[in-house]
Every structure is written in C-alpha cells, then in structure tokens.
Amino acid sequence: QVQLVESGGGVVQPGRSLRLSCATSGFSFSSSGMHWVRLAPGRGLEWVAVTSYDGNDNYYADSVKGRFTVSRDNPRNTLFLHMNSLRTDDTAVYYCAKGSLSGDLTGYWGQGTQVTVSS
Amino acid sequence: DIQMTQSPSSLSASVGDSVTITCRASQSINNYLSWFQLKPGKAPKLLIYAASILQGGVPSTFSGSGSGTDFTLTISSLQPEDFATYYCHQGYSVPYTFGPGTKLEIK
C-alpha cells in the first residue's frame, strides 16, 4: 500500500539549516508530483512547496521562497526539503503528501516530522 | 495569490446535528477545492475533492458543493469522531492555499 515516511526533523537554532526526507513506497513515485505542507502550533495548515514528477518545476509559498528548496531522488523514491535560514516561525510539523494528476493534494500523507527552531 | 476564507471559525454542535461550513476563494478556482479534517497528532485526512467528490472510505454523511468562489462542506448526523478542525484547500493555482480552519466542538 501507499506509504510516506518523513524524517530529518529536530531542534535547530535560528539561521541554521535542516534537510527533511520523505521515503515513499507503494506507488509510482517518478510519475507523481509531491508536496510539503506544515502545521505550526496555534496556526492552521500551510502549504509549503510542490515539485513536479521530474523535479523540473518547483513552486513555493511566499513565506519560504528563497529559503527552502524542494528536490527529489526518483531512483530512491525519496523527496527532500532543504530548509535554510530557519526562523522561529518555521517551527511546525512538516508533512509530505502525494500529488494528484492535476497537481493538487491527494489523500496520501505521511505522519509528519517535527521541526523546532529555537535558540 | 488566492486567499481562502472560512466561516465560522468555530462551531459548537451536538451528536446527531447537521452542520455546514462555508469556504470562499478570493477569485474563481473552478472546482479545484478540497476539504481536509485534522485531529491532534494525526495527518490531515482528505474528505472531499473536486468540490463534491467523496474520497474513498469517507462516510456519506459528509458532502461538498459549490464552484467558482463559494463552497460548502456539510456534515449530517454528527458522530463523536467528527469533532475536529476542518480546512478547505484550493488546488487551482500555485501557491496553493488553505483556509484558516473551522474548529467543530461538542456542545
């Protein structure tokens, strides 16, 4: 069955970097767009980024543009989120999610990985 | 960017009640509207996509309608497990966006 498992979260100081991974199985990863979405404490869901099936088209929320980069390794069925210049308001649970044929979110999500940005 | 609003922001209801949540987009998004349910410690759960199509495995007590800019999620005959926070989401154009959420609480 479809599985998505995030890893790489942790506690990091403001201004530092972190890389999240999302290992997938059970579907054709190399044919699927993939998303990152986050849930910050006391705030709602926020869409973060999407990458096309081949990684050539990437889009970001204004709040992370220029600081975060989404990438993928299709042979390893793995999605990444490279987060630079982290700020305290980046503290959140980060989820990866499979995209639909139209590019939108589907019902396949990981369980999330916690990122805490604190000095 | 397309802004999404939801009303109400919170709602109290009893088991067995029917409730409706409204979502509005700042511009037309055709029917590229999804509804998600969020419970503490769990991944968001897709309930409705393409404005009105029920995701597999979701009870038929959930229904969605609308197109263009105005959408609704209706939950008929509320069950205890339905008390959660609900988000609408537009997948029409990037940056994709969520509404601010509606918290459904037990009265």
Image: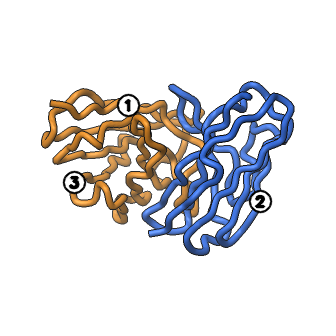
Chain colours: A orange, B blue
Q: Chain of mark 1?
A: A
Q: CA distance from mark 1 to mark 2?
A: 33 Å
Quadrant in which residue B34 is drawn: bottom right
Q: Is residue B37 left or right of residue A11?
A: right
Disc 2 marks which amino acid?
Ser
**Cβ atoms under marks 3 and 1 closer than 8 Å:** no
Q: Is the residue marked by circle 1 packed among few (<14), some (14-19), or many (20+) residues within 10 Å? A: many
Label 1 sits on a secondary structure element that is strand
x 52%, y 53%: residue: A99
Indicate the position of residue A68 as horizontal and vertical percent values.
26, 52
Indicate the position of residue B11 as horizontal and vertical percent values.
68, 40
Residue B65 - label = 2
Is A64 located above or below residue B24 in the figure? above
Q: Nearer the viewer, mark 3 or mark 2?
A: 2
Quadrant in which residue A23 is drawn: top left
Q: CA distance from mark 3 to mark 1?
A: 19 Å
- Which residue position is annotated with label 1? A113
Q: Is residue B45 visible?
A: no
Q: Is residue B68 left or right of residue A118?
A: right
x 67%, y 37%: residue: B104
Disc 3 marks which amino acid?
Arg
Q: Are marks 1 and 2 on the same chain?
A: no
Q: Chain of mark 3?
A: A
Q: Are marks 3 and 1 on the same chain?
A: yes
Q: Are marks 3 and 2 on the same chain?
A: no
Disc 1 marks which amino acid?
Thr
Q: Is residue A84 visible?
A: yes
Is A85 located above or below residue B1 in the figure? above
Indicate the position of residue A39 as horizontal and vertical percent values.
43, 39
Q: Quadrant of the C terminus of chain A?
A: top left
- Which residue position is annotated with label 3? A67
